[in-house]
Image: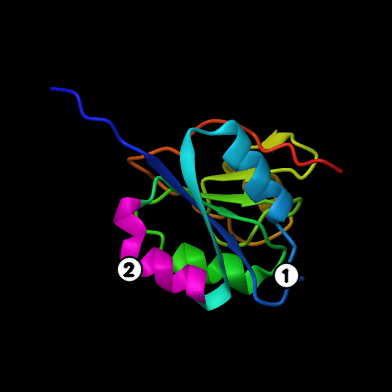
């Protein structure tokens, strides 16, 4: 017997960003995915992921703050971690989605970025995947 699963996506934003930062991404995800989209900030997002990670299908980080991405990556375990931004983080993530809507594979981008550094960012292996849709927030 097949079971139905309501996809759950956590959108995480750094505490140091403006309060409305990321609202357009949350809105775009809610409009385009058949999923429950939860928005949390800073340490609340990290704690939520630590405690309820197994109930999530993926995490979308909407932040240019390195510490925010690092904190979430440290507790993500098997939950796919995507970063919506224009910079490839120094920690392993599953995918980087450019703010102009283009997709950048984090492993390829990490290899390009690491050509100037000592070591490449390791890729992450996931058993689940995030519901597919690229957020295209209104400008």
Q: Magenta segment: does it hold 78?
A: no
Q: Magenta segment: does it hold 54?
A: yes
> Residue 118's x, y, as percent?
63, 62
SS for dot 1: loop
Between 24 and 106, which is closer to the camera in this rendering? Answer: 24
Quarter assignment of residue 61: bottom right
Residue occupying image coordinates x 60% and y 32%: 32
SS for dot 2: helix
Residue occupying image coordinates x 64% and y 70%: 14
Q: Is residue 63 left or right of residue 8?
A: right
> According to the image, what is the colour scheme of the structure?
rainbow
> Residue 92's x, y, as percent?
52, 56
Image height of 21 relative to 78, above or below:
below
Within 10 Å of the Cα at label 1, are there few (<14), some (14-19), or many (20+) other Cα atoms? few
Q: Is residue 5 left or right of residue 79?
A: left
Give how far apart the Cα atoms at labels 2 and 1 are: 24 Å
**Residue 132 visible to the viewer:** yes
The residue identified by callout 1 is 19
Q: Which contiguous range is marked in magenta? A: 44-55
Between 117 and 99, which is closer to the camera in this rendering? Answer: 99
The quarter in which the C terminus is drawn is top right
The mark that comes first in sequence, 2 or 1, is: 1
Q: Residue furthest right?
A: 139
Q: Which label number is shown at residue 51? A: 2
> Residue 10's x, y, as percent?
49, 54
């Amino acid at each position: 017997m097949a079971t139905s699963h309501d996809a759950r996506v956590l959108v995480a934003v750094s505490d140091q960003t403006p309060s409305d930062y990321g609202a357009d991404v949350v809105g775009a995800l809610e409009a385009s995915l058949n999923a429950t989209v939860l928005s949390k900030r800073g340490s609340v997002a990290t704690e939520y992921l630590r405690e309820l990670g197994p109930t999530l299908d993926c995490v979308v980080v909407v932040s240019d703050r390195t510490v925010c991405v690092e904190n979430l990556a440290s507790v993500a375990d098997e939950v796919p971690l995507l970063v919506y931004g224009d910079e490839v983080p120094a920690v392993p993530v599953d995918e980087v989605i450019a703010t102009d809507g283009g997709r950048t594979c984090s492993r390829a981008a990490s290899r390009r970025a690491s050509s100037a550094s000592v070591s490449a960012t390791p890729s992450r292996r996931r058993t689940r995947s995030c519901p597919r849709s690229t957020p295209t927030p209104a400008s």
